[in-house]
Structure formats: C-alpha cells, structure tokens
Amino acid sequence: METKSFSQAAETNFVTQSAVSQQVRGLEEKYRRKLLERVRGRREVRLTEPGAAFYEESKQVVASYRQLEERMRTMTGTIGGTVRVATVYSIGLHELPPVVRRFMALYPEAKIDLEYSRTTRIVREVLEGEVELGLVAFPEKKRGLEVVLIGGDRLVLICPPQHPLAKQKKIRAGDLNNQDFVLFERDIPTRRATDRILRAHGVTVRRVAEFDNIETIKRAVEVGFGLAIVPRPSVVDEQRSGQLSVVALAEPEWERTVGVIYRSDRTLGTAAQKFVQLLKDEGLK
C-alpha cells in the first residue's frame, strides 16, 4: 500500500498491472472480504478495514521471513540479503554512491535497495518498518528511533555567476539581508536550520520560491530566481562547470549534520549493521 496505486506497485515489483490486480482479487476471494477500494475522483486505492488488518499482519509475516533468511545466512557466515535504505536527494545523489559501491565490493552477495524521499516520510517509513535504515540531514532524537551520526558538511551560498555576491570568497549572514531566495519547503530540516540561523543574525530574506528537492532548487538559482543555501557536496559539479558560483558562509553554525536512523526496538540485520559501520568508519565524501 506504500504506492497507493496498482500501476506503481506493478512497476516497483517488476510485474504487470494485471498480475497485481489478479493477486489482490485472489486474496479477496480467499478471505471473502474486500481489501481495497478506489478513492473517488482520484487514481488511487486505499485499504478497507479488513485490508488494513491484512496489511499489518502481512508486514509481520514478511519481517519474520526476512529474519529467518538472516539467521540462515548467519549460520553459513554469509553477508547477504537486501538492506532497504531511504534517504533525501542531496545525500543519496551526491554523497552516498561511493559508500554504496564500497559496500557492494566488500559484500557482493548483499544488495542496497535505495529510495529517495523527504525527511518526514523517511522517519515515518523507518518507524513503520517499511525501510530498515534512513539517512537524513539534521537527525532529531525521537522516541522509537536510534540515531547514529556519521559526519556532516558545510552549507554554502549558491548564486548565478553574474550575481554581485559571486565575486566574494566568503560572506557573512548580514550580507544576505533583503536578498531574493529560493528555499527548501518549511518542513525540510535544512530549511528550518537556515531560518534559525538567519533569524539569530537578524536577517530577513525575500522568499521567491520553495521546493522540496535540491535539484529543482539548483536549476531555479541557475536561471536567476534568487540565491539559495545548500550543502556543499551537492553543488561540486555545477561549480566545476561554471553553472553556479559557490560562496562560503563565514559563521561556524552553517554546518549540516548527517545521521543514520533505525528503529530502536529491532535488531538490524547483519548486512545493515555492516553498512552502518561502513558509514561510521568512512563517512560521506
């Protein structure tokens, strides 16, 4: 039910949409209960009450099966299986790939199943057991979650090469007062940190646009919508190609922490443990 769509469920599991429909229909006939219903006016489905019960119990069955497989692999000394990881775009696209490649080289029988999402959804998916690990910026302690810090990086200002601030090597927060800005949406941790730091320095910026992912923000800045504050690793390519100018921020608090989150009441599989250890040992580049 994560996708709320027959077509997306089919695509995710590499089967046809009709195969998904037939499986659902077969289950409904078996249990003589309607498990799904269509949302009126939208191309989505939702769980009925029996469907919700079936879904919750099925998740427990799948979790038990994965635990069984993990125990069998442990007995043979094999590090294998799939580690389901959810992360935000800025980490997943620009910092995580070298670690994933290193992990796959060390443990060729293991697999990283990586998905991109926003922080609020990642936290929810980890707590609900839909993914094993989450990688997020500015991780917050929350009941039921274990947080492992794996490093951090600097936040920087980006602007078009022709912008007056592009000539500066380093600027202070006060230099940003009344500038046009392209921002992350309000529920994204980097946005909350940016707002907090600017407020602490008495700086007000003009909000031109808000987006939920780093790639859209970079393109908006590139075409002249305004300035933006983003993690340094996410704009290395654009700086090298001359698409964007990257300017350091002087204050020490422009630092983004990164961490791994997972459920505190569950023991991670061996492959997941190895992946977390690799992240702790090598960090993100």
Image: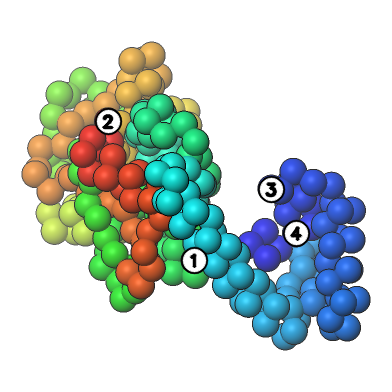
According to the picture, the residue beneath numbered tag 2 turns out to be 285
According to the picture, the residue beneath numbered tag 3 turns out to be 12
SS assignment at label 1: loop
Q: Which mark is residue 106?
A: none
Check whether the beta carbons of the residues at disc 4 and disc 2 lie within 8 A of each other.
Answer: no
Q: Amino acid at mark 1?
A: Gly
Circle nearer the N terminus (2, 1): 1
> Marks 2 and 3, Cα distance to the nearest angstrom?
29 Å
Which residue is drawn at the image coordinates 30% and 71% (left, top)? 142
Front position in the image: 57 or 248: 57
Above or below, 86 relative to 156:
below
Q: Mark yes or no: residue 86 visible.
A: no
Can you give x and y, in whole percent of width and height, for residue 34 in the image? 84, 80
Query: Does residue 275 appear left or right of residue 175 in this picture?
Result: right
Check whether the beta carbons of the residues at disc 3 and disc 1 lie within 8 A of each other.
Answer: no
Query: Does residue 2 appear left or right of residue 269 in this picture?
Result: right
Q: Which mark is residue 129?
A: 1
